[in-house]
Amino acid sequence: MFPNEMQILQQLAVLVVCRSLATGQISSRYFFPQKPMPWVKGREYCQSHFVDLAVLNTEEEYSALLSAIPTNNASFWLGLHKKSSGWEWTDGEQLRLTHWYNYNHEGHCVSLEAMFEEKDKLLARYCNEQHRVVCQGPVSPQSVSVDFVNIDHVNLSWNISALMQTTSHYYNVTICSFICETLSYFYTNGSSLMSISVSNLSAATEYFIYVSAVVIHLDHGTNRKWILQDNPTTLKAKTATSNKTHKIFFIVSNSFSLVLLASSFWCIYHIVKKETVQDTSSVDSTIAELLPHRSGSEKLENVIF
Ligand SMILES: *[C@@H]1O[C@H](CO)[C@@H](O)[C@H](O)[C@H]1NC(C)=O
Ligand SMILES: *[C@@H]1O[C@H](CO)[C@@H](O)[C@H](O)[C@H]1NC(C)=O
Ligand SMILES: *[C@@H]1O[C@H](CO)[C@@H](O)[C@H](O)[C@H]1NC(C)=O
Ligand SMILES: *[C@@H]1O[C@H](CO)[C@@H](O)[C@H](O)[C@H]1NC(C)=O
Ligand SMILES: *[C@@H]1O[C@H](CO)[C@@H](O)[C@H](O)[C@H]1NC(C)=O
Ligand SMILES: *[C@@H]1O[C@H](CO)[C@@H](O)[C@H](O)[C@H]1NC(C)=O
Ligand SMILES: *[C@@H]1O[C@H](CO)[C@@H](O)[C@H](O)[C@H]1NC(C)=O
């Protein structure tokens, strides 16, 4: 495939996966339109362009939004409002975060006050006030479980959040050993679990797997198609290793073409070791390891082993 590289890299293996984005494709989880609007209008806007107003079910999501939000004077509507049962996110989940800055008993809609120094920035306000909004894009799985792995077959499953259960979407699953393959899986029903089975992979004892949620939006005004994609959830799946026989190394690059949206470009860099597998008797047990974080935009990730 790459004869020169093969020679140079006989003892060193490198695998680079880069995902560049097509026109109209955005890779992010939160979006910050400029225009101030009342809460209900803001929700409609987010639903027609993205997924919904931002829903923050976990501390991790709250922190992720704080690090992404423009720190200017603005207040941003979130997808959090008061129902008869209490404070509820627009996906139907109850509020679990305790980050109230202030709690106005008459306000039924919640904004995030980006300019506050405090960590607690939630503020209940009157819903007809006009503020900017935080729109929510698709969300990749929180974690992925490897149900089965052998030298050419991987079974994966993940929970679907309430938000994604009500959103038509699909997952792009990239599985890399010494080459990468990307497959798309549509979420078709109201199930809370997605399970996939990928067979006929190029034989390997170790796979790097990237699962990202994708939503496609057709803008009826301009008739343009927007592809919204969250950063991938990253994991490694390993068959129980047979002893090393010999190693084969490749360089793989999906695409290196630079795109205008540089921040929407993610790149994963691995030092990869591939062992040819001759002993298939020892591959029936499974070691699956979740890498500690998602690979974010422009973040390079090194895994050396
Ligand atoms: C922030 O708001 C205050 C009061 O509304 C205003 O005086 C100040 O100029 C604003 N700052 C910025 C950076 O917009
Ligand atoms: C899915 O959710 C169930 C119940 O909360 C949990 O036991 C399971 O570990 C989750 N699976 C994954 C892959 O996160
Ligand atoms: C998802 O994968 C398919 C190939 O299976 C590819 O054509 C498509 O561009 C990918 N979509 C995104 C958003 O990466
Ligand atoms: C949804 O699909 C999953 C498999 O992906 C299946 O286990 C489940 O039974 C389906 N649920 C419904 C309601 O069709
Ligand atoms: C992997 O998934 C496929 C399809 O759901 C299933 O038929 C197969 O039994 C699974 N393999 C294992 C080892 O669980
Ligand atoms: C896997 O490959 C074999 C032989 O090439 C083919 O017969 C089979 O249909 C393939 N299975 C899948 C699930 O693609
Ligand atoms: C791998 O090699 C070690 C030591 O060389 C040996 O003890 C072990 O049994 C071998 N494992 C397998 C699966 O062959």
Image: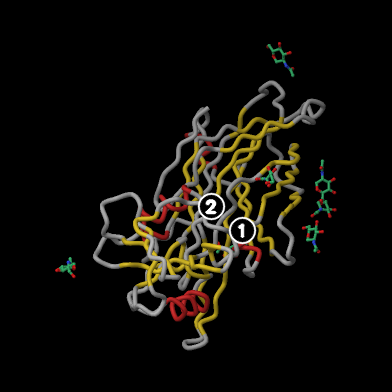
Looking at the image, do the residues carrying marks 2 and 1 touch, with CB atoms under 8 Å apart? yes
User: Viewer-proximal residue, 38 or 160?
Assistant: 38
Identify which amino acid the numbered label 1 is placed on. Asn
Residue at disc 2, CB closer than 8 Å to ligand 3: no
Report the disc number at residue 232.
2
Where on the picture, by quarter, is residue 291?
A: top right
Res 218 → quadrant: bottom right
Q: Quadrant of residue 240?
A: top right
Q: CA distance from mark 2 to mark 1?
A: 9 Å
Task: Identify the residue at image location x=60%, y=52%.
Answer: 141
> Which residue is identified by label 1?
172
Amino acid type indicated by mark 2: Pro
Residue at disc 1, CB closer than 8 Å to ligand 3: yes
- At mark 1, the secondary structure is strand
Q: Residue furthest bottom?
A: 221
- What secondary structure is marked by label 2? loop
Q: Taking 273 as reference, is 278 left or right?
A: right
Badge 1: how crowded within 10 Å, few (<14), some, or many (20+)? some
Residue 241: percent from the left, percent from the top? 70, 26
Q: Residue at x 41, y 71 (%)?
A: 106
**Measured from the top left, where is residue 50 in percent x and y?**
50, 72
From this view, report whether residue 234 is shown above or below residue 297.
above
Residue closest to the eye, 27 or 180: 27
- The reply, left or right, for residue 281 in relation to residue 301 is right
